[in-house]
Amino acid sequence: MENREHPIQGVMETAMKSIREMVDVNTIVGNPITTADGSTIIPVSKVGFGFASGGSDFKQKNHTEGETPCFGGGSGAGVTITPIAFLIVSSNGGVSLLPVDNPQFSAVDKAIDMLPSMVDKLKEAFSKKKCDREND
């Protein structure tokens, strides 16, 4: 018996190729946009996709022994792209994350985003206290 590729393989390969064309790294982390002041904005999205494929071999009414059975099959895919934030690299080198109003973005995510500015403020406060003590 010859080793032939089953028709479902072709159906699945075609569907997977289409998904690869729809979803790539630039879909998740978008192309950077440079603003007039020299800042760079990078869109960040959440991508989800689903895939299903199926099929069946069936014999015709007048099927003869050794005859290849008929095949019926299909596949489908769905993709969702949800913008979740913008990564902003300012011209002075600061980096911040600007979330899109999205209930999926938790308080922890916002706290992590605020951390660099909090560290800067704490450094500034401690350096002011040190200067005040030295001047007394």
Image (tube, grey):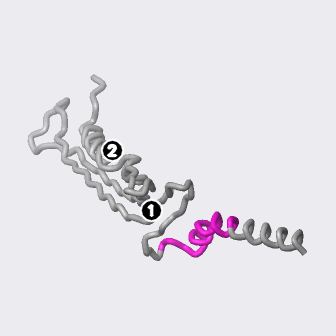
| x and y, in percent, of residue 72 in the image | 19, 47
Q: Label 1's element? A: strand
Residue closest to the eye, 1 or 115: 115
Rendered view: 35 above or below 108: above
Q: Are marks 1 and 2 in contact (CB under 8 Å)?
A: no
Q: Which residues are magenta?
A: 104-120
Dot 2: few (<14), some (14–19), or many (≥20) neighbours within 10 Å? few
Label annotation for residue 20: 2
Q: Which residue is mark 1?
A: 86
Q: Which residue does the image show at 84% across and 73% down from the upper left?
A: 132
| x and y, in percent, of residue 124 in the image | 73, 68
Quadrant in which residue 125 is drawn: bottom right
Dot 1: few (<14), some (14–19), or many (≥20) neighbours within 10 Å? many
Q: CA distance from mark 1 to mark 2?
A: 24 Å
Q: Is residue 2 visible?
A: yes
Q: Label 2's element? A: helix
Q: Which residue does the image show at 28% across and 50% down from the upper left?
A: 54
Is 117 colored magenta in this rendering? yes
Secondary structure, magenta segment, majority class: helix
